[in-house]
Amino acid sequence: MKLLENKTALITGATRGIGKGIAQMYAKQGANVAFTYSSSVEAATALETELNGYGVKAKGYQSNAADFDAAQELAAEVLKEFGSIDILINNAGITKDNLLMRISEDDFDKVIEINLKSVFNLTKAVIRPMMKQRGGSIINMSSVVGLKGNAGQSNYAASKAGIVGFSKSVALELGSRNIRSNVIAPGFIETEMTAKLDEATLDGWRKSIPLKRGGTPEDIANACVFLGSDMSTYITGQTLSVDGGMLT
């Protein structure tokens, strides 16, 4: 039996990196997958085809999660197409790194809007259907940076720390309706984005991690499978660090 059989998941920002890894793992575990992407139609079409190959229903939606009305429309479309939304994974995010002295107001606002407000928008869009279903799992993607801060990332750290507080509040509000809200805080995960960095820098990071390696999108996806599945029905309001021991 697959762990996510007969469940429908909505995953934001799923055409690359961690989001793509989650979408692939969810399809392998039997979930139907609705996913969002911002610009690359080609990547979305390829992912749709790949996920359908696992024998599940998959569909990509070009949608801006940071836009409140677009998030409402998206949830309504996914419900119409799939019949339910059992799991929401808020994964879409950006960085605009700079020292506080140099961060523009626009760079601060954009990061908060895309990383944090999108979580509010989509959570608000799915809670009514989840309440009707009397169940659901919301998984919000924070970061090790949201838990410990990082020089040059005050905007990103603020957005990711905000996700933790938001998720805990949602857990308290919706627990009686059997809706769970948890956070995953990835550490240093090796994706297409980190591949652009020079090898010496990457190696220095790996050596500083107790498990002596960077994480993979699959490491994060496995944690998402657990929190989305019925194996975690008594877990809510928690932050699971998937960071190889970075914060230990």
Image (tube, helix red, strand yellow):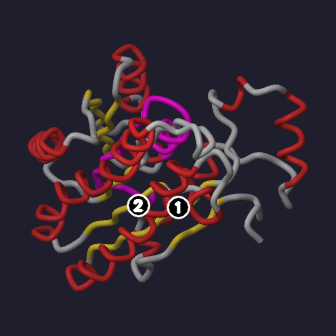
Mark on residue 139?
A: 2
- Horizontal side, residue 195 vs residue 228: left or right: right
Comparing 97 with 216, the one in front is: 97
Q: Dividing the picture into quarters, in which one does residue 237 lie?
A: bottom left
Residue interval drawn in magenta: 1-25
Residue 110: horizontal and vertical position, in percent?
38, 39
| Cβ atoms at labels 1 and 2 below 8 Å apart | yes
Density class for disc 1 (Cα within 10 Å; few <14, some 14-19, many ≥20) is: many
- 200, above or below 133, in the image: above
- In the rendering, at what x and y percent does residue 41 appear? 34, 16
The answer to whether residue 117 is left or right of residue 156 is left
Q: Which sits earlier in the primary sequence, circle 1 or circle 2?
A: 2
Q: Does residue 234 sit above or below 130 in this rendering?
A: below
Kindly identify which residue carries mark 1. 184
Q: Is residue 210 visible?
A: yes
Instruction: Assess whether residue 60 is covered by the magenta stretch.
Output: no
Distance in Å between CA atoms under marks 1 and 2: 7 Å
Q: Position of residue 44 (x, y in %)?
A: 37, 23
Q: Secondary structure at mark 1?
A: strand
